[in-house]
Image (cartoon, rainbow, N blue to C red):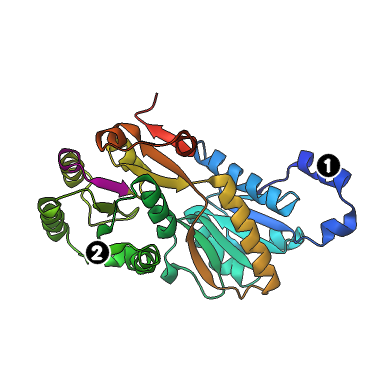
Amino acid sequence: MFCRVFFSRWLALWLLLFCGIARAQTPAVAIVYPEVREPFLSVFQEIARGMEQELGKPVGHYLLNEGDTADRLIDTLKNDRIDVVVTLGRAGLAVAKPLSAVFPVVIGATIIHPNEVPQGLTGISLTPAPEAMFDHLKKLVPDIKKITVIYDPRQTAWEIDHAEQAARERGLQLIAQPTESLRNSSELFRQILLEVKDNSIALWLPRENAAMDEQSLLPEVLREAWEKNFVVFSSNLEHVRKGALFSLYPDNFGMGRSLANLALQQVQSNGKFESVKLLRDLLVAVNLRTAEHLGLRFSNQTRREFAMVFPSR
């Protein structure tokens, strides 16, 4: 049976501050996500808090259990007079399609590919927007002129297409090399490592990248980058801990606000607003040891923007 959670404290505060008429003007929003433990539970709850701040009212929490069905969830949402549904995580994505036959639906808190999203749905992928990645790159390393990326087109072709336009708009040259085999990708990476002559070229590692062997190739790439003083940045936070210069990772509260806005758009368009967006609500993590080795100096203002630093102090 679905677990429904409503925050009475929020509801009381809302009733004190706003009249019933104003409240009725904002759609009733539900968030659907799997019943999980920490730290994932805190992620979903932080997203919910962001949604509630943007909407100015509480959202209904509907937790998916193993035996639950989409039909039962739909009946529950109907009984609760929900206007629009936001699904979170892979389990939420799995029920998004049947829900969309009845409700406007927004997908979030998971990696989304355009071919996964049924017609009439919208959502925000956890994949960091290349625009944000490149803006931070230019801010941290202004001398960068070229970005090289090796990627598996089966996973990230859409992201790379998006990145090519973002690079052009910022006066950067993006050299994107597709590969569908680890053996070929290893050869491509090693060729790049041989050809790098100065620090005007940066190597970008996408978040989802079957072209990168994390166990053997990644340490080699980071070691060569250290020895040759060139920049490696990544859409994968774990790579920063291992030596990449920086990464961007989700601002869960900000993502919640953006999902709430999409939910309102879905209601206004009667569930016909179709678009998968890349994540722009992001925090920056920087490896200060790598930055110092590269000779980078940051102002106090820039340092205050670092939400996470490595090595951890």
Q: Position of residue 82 (x, y in %)?
A: 73, 61
Give me the C-alpha separation between circle 1 and circle 2: 55 Å
Q: Is residue 180 left or right of residue 285?
A: left
Q: Nearer the viewer, residue 156 or 231?
A: 231
Magenta region includes residue 159: no
- What's the residue at 22%, 52% (across, down)? 212
Which one is in front, 35 or 110?
110
Which numbered dot is residue 129?
Answer: none
Q: Earlier in the sequence, mark 1 or mark 2?
A: 1
Q: Nearer the viewer, mark 1 or mark 2?
A: 2
93 w.r.t. 289: above or below = below
* Residue 299 drawn above or below residue 130: above
In the rendered image, which quarter is residue 238 located in? top left
Quick check: 79 above or below 304?
Answer: below
**Residue 13 left/right relative to 239:** right
In the picture, the quarter occupied by the C terminus is: top left
Look at the image and give the residue range highlighted in magenta.
225-233
**Residue 138 drawn above or below residue 288:** below
Q: Is residue 178 visible?
A: yes
Point out residue 209 in the picture as x, y percentages from the top left corner: 29, 56
> In the rendered image, which residue does mark 1 sit on?
12
Could you say whether the residue bearing mark 2 is in a helix, strand or loop? strand
Q: Amino acid at mark 1?
A: Ala
Give the residue displayed 59% in from the left and 42% down from the top: 46
The residue tagged 2 is 175
Residue 35 horizontal/vertical position (percent): 55, 45
The crowding category of the residue bearing disc 1, from other C-alpha atoms within 10 Å (few below 14, some 14 to 19, many at least 20), is few
The amino acid type found where label 2 is placed reads: Ile
Q: Is residue 1 visible?
A: no
Q: Where residue 65 sits: x, y (%)?
A: 56, 49
